Image (spheres, rainbow, N blue to C red):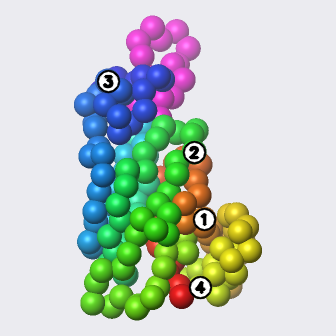
Amino acid sequence: MTCSTTGILGTGLDGGGDTLPVGWALTSGTLTVPISACPSPSSGSSSAPEPVIYTLTLDFTAQEASCKGDDPSGVQGTWVKLHSADECVQTGPRNNVGAVLLGWSTSSDFPVALARSQVAKGWGVIDDTINGVRMIFIPAGMSTFVSGDNKLVPIWGP
């Protein structure tokens, strides 16, 4: 696969044939989305650099769920829109009746009460240290900036 600075992974326009399906429904496990990055050519090199592939993993292992809509995909240095609350539902045997997707976090230990408060106030992303651990929370339907590999887990609440 060669690097293309004009393509967007997931559209078939990146020249590498790494086209993702248009819609998805995941019932368990993880969804790994490849994100391409085009490094700068090295000095004196006339050939196009090979892309660096990053992954954004949406991890549904702890709570089975199903989401509809387009896959979150993009190129390094761009914003990627994450699924909104009305696009995802819990589907597994451990589902909580009436639970809605509040957002996405880098930690499954992100406090649900804090997520619920953030969403109720219509505020944006939280990037804070909670109990000694850096945690990021992105409300459902908002975007994340692609800068490298990352894993996000859904935060569900009443």
Three-letter code for the amino acid on which mark 2 is drawn: Trp
Q: CA distance from mark 2 to mark 4?
A: 25 Å
> Secondary structure beneath disc 1?
strand
Q: CA distance from mark 1 to mark 4?
A: 12 Å
Label located before the other in sequence (2 or 1): 2
Instruction: Verify whether residue 115 appears in magenta.
Output: no
| Point 28% across, 62% down: residue | 25
Label located before the other in sequence (4 or 3): 3
Q: Which residues are magenta?
A: 37-51
> Secondary structure beneath disc 2?
strand
Do tag 2 and tag 4 residues touch (Cβ < 8 Å)? no
Label number found at residue 79: 2
Three-letter code for the amino acid on which mark 3 is drawn: Gly
Instruction: Verify whether residue 41 appears in magenta.
Output: yes
Q: CA distance from mark 4 to mark 3?
A: 42 Å
In depth, the one of 79 and 16 nearer the eye is: 79
Label located before the other in sequence (1 or 3): 3
Residue 116's place in the image compared with 30, above or below, is below
| Point 73% across, 67% down: residue | 123
Tell me if mark 3 has few (under 14), some (14-19) or many (20+) residues whose alpha carbon lies within 10 angstroms of its own: some
Label number found at residue 112: 4
* Of marks 1 and 3, the one in the foreground: 1
Q: Which residue is mark 1?
A: 138
Horizontally, is 3 left or right of 158 in the view? left
Q: Which residue is mark 3?
A: 15
